[in-house]
Amino acid sequence: MSASSLVADAVWKEIESTGSVSDDQLSILHFLFGKNFERATRIVDQRGVKRVSGQPSGRSVFQVVGESRRKEEYLCFAEQFCACYSFFYDIVNRGEQLCCKHQLAARLAASLGACIEVQVSDEELALLLSKL
């Protein structure tokens, strides 16, 4: 794991424990993620993050709205994966970023309790995930 990833994880853990973001934490996250962090905060501010939880298992995935006019939604596991083009191009193929704006938005919304919570059956969640 890179030093940047370790710093980011430490900051996320602090935010999760307090449920708020300090100016210092904002500065660090902005330094690490740049424009992606700015875009992620816009998505969170516009209530564009849903946590879809299957019942009775409690398993969940994030559904994050994109910023284009089409307002497509991307399925996302905040720390591991996003179905967007940028994830595959910038993170997987080129290794230029730690994560995409959708992953950042999901992690930020979850840390701040700003997700729209959606409950579905485990079967519906499996069907949603099968579209990946």
Image (cartoon, rainbow, N blue to C red):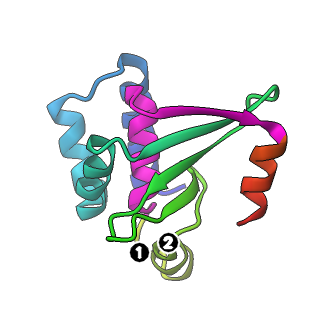
- Figure quadrant of residue 82: bottom right
Total labels drawn: 2
- Figure quadrant of residue 25: top left
Foreground residue among 73 and 92: 73
Whether residue 1 is situated above or below residue 125 in the rendered picture: below
- The 10 Å Cα crowd at callout 1, few under 14, some 14 to 19, many 20 or more, is few
Rendered location of residue 128, percent (x, y): 72, 54
User: Which of marks 1 and 2 precedes in the sequence?
Assistant: 2
Q: Is residue 78 magenta?
A: no
Side of 125 where 67 appears, left or right: left
Q: Is residue 47 visible?
A: yes
Whether residue 72 is situated above or below residue 19 in the rendered picture: below
Rendered location of residue 98, percent (x, y): 44, 61
Q: Is residue 3 visible?
A: no
Residue denoted by label 1: 96
What is the secondary structure assignment of the residue under circle 2?
helix
The amino acid type of the residue labelled 2 equals: Ile
What is the secondary structure assignment of the residue under circle 1?
loop
Residue 91, numbered circle: 2
Rendered location of residue 94, percent (x, y): 48, 82
Residue at 47% over, 34% down: 116
Rendered location of residue 42, percent (x, y): 25, 50
* Range covered by the magenta-colored residues: 98-122
Q: Is residue 101 magenta?
A: yes
Q: Residue furthest left?
A: 23
- Figure quadrant of residue 115: top left
